[in-house]
Each structure stands twice: as structure tokens, then as C-alpha cells.
Amino acid sequence: MTPPHASDTSPSTEDSPGSTSTRDEPGGVVASPADVEAFAARTMLTDAAAGRVGIETEWFVVEAGVPDRPVSPGRTRAALGGHDVGLPGGSSITFEPGGQLELSGPPAPLPEALRAMASDLADVRGRLADDGLRLAGLGADPLRAPRRLLTQGRYVAMEAFFRAAGFPAGEVMMCSTAALQVNLDAGPRAGWAERWRLAHTLGPVLSAMFASSPVLAGRRTGRVSTRQGVWAGLDPTRTAPVAGGATVRDPAGQWARYLLDARLMLIRDHPAADRCVPVLDGTTFGDWVAGAGPVRRPPTTDDLSYHASTLFPPVRPRGWLELRYLDAQSAARWPLAVTVATALLDDPTAADLARDACAAVTGHWAQASLVGLADPDLRRAATRCVTAAVEAAPRLGVSPALTAELAEFADEYVLRGRCPAHAALASWQAGGAPAVLLDATTPADAPQLT
């Protein structure tokens, strides 16, 4: 697994070494669907033992005295001490278009990855607190309207694409949502199809279990995961699940078809100058391969890699499995969400139990976003899954304290059909949208990870 330090909206440039075909080299022409299939087979997943996790946490930055005021990345960066911030756990710092701060940790076994991210978050929170800034862990900004604060060419073109294509949720996604991403090794090649399918099957259940975004821009939305609802309102050729059914025999073939069928969002006029041109005519990458692209030249492998970086399915293959369906979590709950997701995919016993538990709710993304664990089928599946995760946690080296926190979360939330969105709604009842945002920034000790 390459360290997952690339931001959600940054270009993905990973490529597998050892290829000798000109078309496999950066800049080589993609002349046919077969070339896309070869690219997918070469880059989708890496044949390696499972066992490492890379954690990416996203946070809304809030100035406590004026919570309705956006905080620019420049202000946050200055509070952190500049661009060269050496964090003890090795995380990198990037920003999303609305100023959301992202910490991306290097891959490591679960206990080490948790400790490293906790250490880095403590460092960052301390530096920001000295300048009156706090971090809020929610899936959607409950108070502030979406506003793009970054001006790079990629983001300008992305915003233009969503507006022209009739997807008003695009600006909300870019500027007002935050996620917790869990990156897991692909595992040995022989198990890819089953692991790929399970990662998708778990999505609705884990999305419902950790939904944390019932309020957006000052209003209740009627959803427990507004973030997931926002994603559902975007271009489905780039946000729908890659593996839609229960049977998966050829993950690389599925990914190749997804790459071909997805609309082009933008092309780079000159990568070194960060000049990006939005593609507004509905052209797909497959159209471009067939000679009907937005420019006269044929697409290259660089174009295909960049195109892949503009696709945001719930599970995205990047050599590893990038789980993108979790709402951002509070300081106390993100280790729980990471532990559950990792246990249900990496512990064989838990994986078997989860596969069976979630079979009846495969594809129930809409219900998960709307009502979460109030759906009885999702609740039953979640109860079995969180129980399996609690039992698996010690086998993965998780500390007794964190295991106990997870068991408490199961009792307080999952078994009662609740999720973190209910805590946010309690804040809403007490003080409206400002209280939802500020309560999410309340300093909280993370569970003991050692």
C-alpha cells in the first residue's frame, strides 16, 4: 500500500512498476478499451498480505468566538506553524476546497495506525487551540453555507463542471462535507473478488452505524447522513458503487467499465501550470478512447490516471481499498469507526459473520442515509457486525480500553438503533446549528490506544 497521503480531490499518480509496454508508461496512448482494461488490472489492487490500515480524518475548522465565520486554509496553516509541519505520527496535512483540514496517516498495523493518528491529532488540536481554532468532527457543516476557499485550477474546473452539469450538490460536497476514510491492503490476489465485494456490502451498514450529519447550513435535512445524501445527488457515473451486485467475479473488469463509462470532469491543459479545463458536453472517457473526445489528441495513460482521481465511488481502488462511505467522526469516535471497518474486513472470523449479516441489506445506501439504524434490517445487521468487531478487536491488537469503548458504543448506540447523528440532534434541540457545530468541537479525550 502506498501511503494514502493524497487528498480526496488531489490527483492520483500511483502506477505499478515493471511494465514494459509503451501504453503502460506515463504519457502512453490509450487507444482502445483493452488498454483501459490493462490499466485497471495493473493499477487497481496490489497483491500483498492484508494487515495495514491508512487513516484519513477530515475536520471542519472553527473559530470558537465566531463559529459562523469560515476559516481560510491560510489562517489554519499559519496557526499550525507553516507548510513544513512535522507531526510525530507522520501524517501529512492537506485541505479540501471549503477549508476542511485533512490528516492522512501512513499505513501501519491497526494499533500503530491508531496511535499515530491520535498523536498527530493531539498535536494539531493543541497548535490550533493556541490561536483560538478548534476542529469539529461531523459529516456535514451544520452552520456555514458552502464557500470555496481554495483557488487551484482543479477546484475551479470541478466547480464549473458541477454547475454546468446541473449538480448543485457539487459545491456542497466540495465545501461542506467531511469524511473518515479507511484504507486497507487489498490482500492476496486469490481473495480479491470476495474482499472487494465485502467492502461494498458493508457500506450501507457502516454508513448507518456512524452517520453524523443530520444538519446542513443551518437546517435539519431529515437525514442522519446528509453527507451520503449529498453524494447521492451528484453525477452517478462517478459516485455510484463500482460493484453493484452480490456476485463479483472480475473486480478489474468492473473498474475498467466504470472508468470507460464515467463522464470526463476535466482535463489538464498543462499539469505543471495547474491549468484544468472542465468538460461540459457529457463526454465519457470511453467516448474519448473511441475518437469523440473533448480535444483532438487521443487520451494518454496520464489522462486516464487523472480521470480516475476524479471518480468518487464509495469504495475506490487505488492499489488498496479506499473506504469512502464513513461520515467524519468526533475526537472520541473516529478510533471506533476505524476499528470496526478494519475488523470486519481483516479479521477472518469477523469478516465471515459480517458477510452473512449484511447480505440482506446489500445496496441499501438510500435507507442508510435517510433513517440509519431506524431501519430494522440495517439495525439487525449492524448489531451483528459491531458484536463481531468487539470480539475481533483484541485479536487485532486493539487495547482493552478501546475495546471497552467500542462495546459501550454498541450498547449506547447500535443496539438502540441510534447513531452519532442523534447526539448532533440533541445539540440542535438545545441551541440550533451553532450548538451542533460547537458541541462537535468540545475537547474530548480519545480512548486509550495503548
Image (cartoon, rainbow, N blue to C red):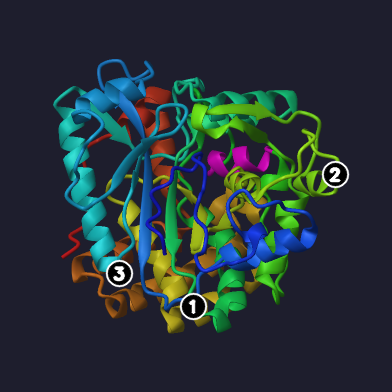
Mark 2 or mark 3: which is in front? 2
- For label 3, the residue is 109
Mark 2 vs mark 1, foreground winner is: 2
**Magenta stretch containing residue 282, yes or no?**
no
Disc 1: which residue? 351
Label 2 SS: loop
Frontmost residue, 415 versus 37: 37
Q: Are marks 1 and 3 in contact (CB under 8 Å)?
A: no
Above or below for 258 versus 250: above
Q: CA distance from mark 2 to mark 3?
A: 46 Å
The percent coordinates of residue 399 (x first, y second) are 21, 69
* Residue 228 colored in magenta in the image: yes
Coordinates of residue 294 in the picture (x, y in percent): 78, 33
Q: Image check: 13 left or right of 100? A: right
Q: Earlier in the sequence, mark 1 or mark 3?
A: 3
For discs 1 and 3, the disc positioned in front in the rendered view: 3
Using the image, determine if residue 187 lies above or below residue 72: below
Task: Give the label on residue 291, or none.
Answer: 2
Q: Which residues are magenta?
A: 224-234
* Residue drawn where x is 26% and y is 22% of the image: 64
Report the residue at 31% width, 76% height from top.
Answer: 396
Name the element at disc 3.
loop
Task: Label 1: state its secondary structure.
Answer: helix
Label 3 environment density (alpha carbons within 10 Å; few <14, some 14–19, many ≥20): some
Query: Is residue 287 or residue 313 the one in the foreground?
Result: 287
Q: Amino acid at mark 3?
A: Pro
Q: Quadrant of residue 448?
A: bottom left
